[in-house]
Image (cartoon, rainbow, N blue to C red):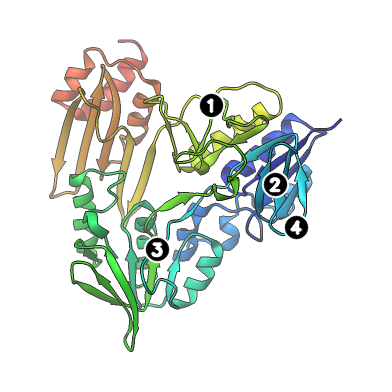
Amino acid sequence: MARRYVVVGGGPAGVVAAETLRRQDATGSVTLVCGEPGPPYARMAIPYAMSGKIDEAGTWLRKEWDHYEALGIQLLHDRVAKVDPDARRVVLAGGGELPYDALLIATGSSPARPRIPGLDLPGVQSCWTLEDLRRIDPMLRPGRRVLLLGAGFVSCIILQSLVQRGAKVTVSCGSSGRMVRSMMDETAGGMIMRWCRAKGVEVLTAGRPTAIERREAGLRVTLDSGQSAEADLVIVGTGVRTNTAFLQGSGIAVEDGIVVDRYLRTSVDSIWAAGDVAQGFNCCTGLREVHAIQPTAVEHGRVAALNMSGTPTEFGGSLSMNTLETLGLISCSFGQWMGRQGGEQVRVVDQEHFRYLRLEFFDGRLVGANTVGMTNEIGIIRGLIQTRVRLGGWLDRLKRDPSRLAEAYVACAQGV
């Protein structure tokens, strides 16, 4: 009897999983449940559509309209309201149900909405979906005042697109007073903040928002520091949460995300998880963590599908890595950029030229890094961390002169 595969989630993990399942099993049925209308798309492409660099079709994960039909993958535009492992079925929000022999949950994440009075006012928007973009786009005209609530990774990508559209942008960093604090230390985040201010972006560092009000001049956002800012449009970018509420009562173990083993299996038989919703293994620490980055989602989807179709395949672990462009300034974080207890560190700081390198070592290996304004080193740092190569005598050389990263990489690869 042909196997029934159900993949819930139309992001990169779900799409790659569906395609891999079809390659692995030519006779099984593959259903891809997408919670939004239209072809599956890359959420990280939305800022590029906002800037005008691409149109909506440019966000699609696969460019041919009939791609899924041609592969025999059924696209179902609905949401899953409940997972029933005992009956091996999922209950759909629109009515009906889907039976499965193997189920993949790749439902990703959603914006975490802070509890602020006025958050539901017209002109206060998230920027997470194509539908959000359609609502925001008509409001973006040169000179429009836009306030970004939050200064994390996603907000900083949106910031660049807003500036490219000619908006007058203000960023509120919240209570931390820092930019991209989840991926950059104070020195790197401070450089990015100073760069943004030099490019005409106002950055508010004191206080979290307590209220949004409609005034004659537009929207006013008040911070708990007593400071306030006015805007024509407020975009909320204060973090995300994994989409797991529909799993209540399913027996599937959930912590920060869905807990999976090295084969991306959940705690319930015949159910796997992948992408931003999965709490998978970190290749540096061996701990289970949510790594909400597209390369991890793609690899999760591939590995989960292999296991679902009967080819046992371990996931080697993900590397937490983010690359950010902020108004032309490139910054990166890798692995355990914040360091490990008992480890060693070296830093090179050039404030004048917006260049920064921080390397973190532990047990004779490179385990993490922060960079600002340095792009040549990205592949080298990633390679040294992912391969977990022991640096040997190169450890002391790099501590004396971190610019020798390329030499170290080549020498260690050759066993020198």
Sooner in the amino-acid sequence: mark 3 or mark 4 = 4
Instruction: Give neighbour class at mark 1: few <14, some 14-19, many 20+ (Cα, 10 Å).
Output: some
Instruction: Give neighbour class at mark 3: few <14, some 14-19, many 20+ (Cα, 10 Å).
Output: many
| Observer able to see residue 170 | no
Sooner in the amino-acid sequence: mark 3 or mark 1 = 3
| Residue 382 x, y percent position in the rendering | 37, 30
Residue tagged 1: 261
Sooner in the amino-acid sequence: mark 1 or mark 4 = 4
Left or right of 112 on screen, residue 152: left
Secondary element at image label 2: strand
Tell me which residue sits at (46%, 42%) in the image. 293
| Residue 271 x, y percent position in the rendering | 64, 34
Residue tagged 2: 32
Which of the two marks, 1 or 4, is nearer to us in this view?
4
Question: Which image quarter is the C terminus in?
Answer: top left
Residue tagged 3: 161
Q: Nearer the viewer, residue 194 or 376?
A: 194
Q: CA distance from mark 3 to mark 1?
A: 38 Å
**How many numbered marks does the figure carry?**
4
> Mark 3 near mark 4, Cβ–Cβ under 8 Å?
no
Which of the two marks, 4 or 2, is nearer to us in this view?
4
Q: Nearer the viewer, residue 165 or 93?
A: 93
Residue tagged 4: 95
Question: Label 3 amino acid?
Answer: Ser
Secondary element at image label 4: loop
Question: Label 4 amino acid?
Answer: Gly
Q: CA distance from mark 1 to mark 4?
A: 32 Å
Question: Label 1 amino acid?
Answer: Asp
Left or right of 150 on screen, residue 203: left
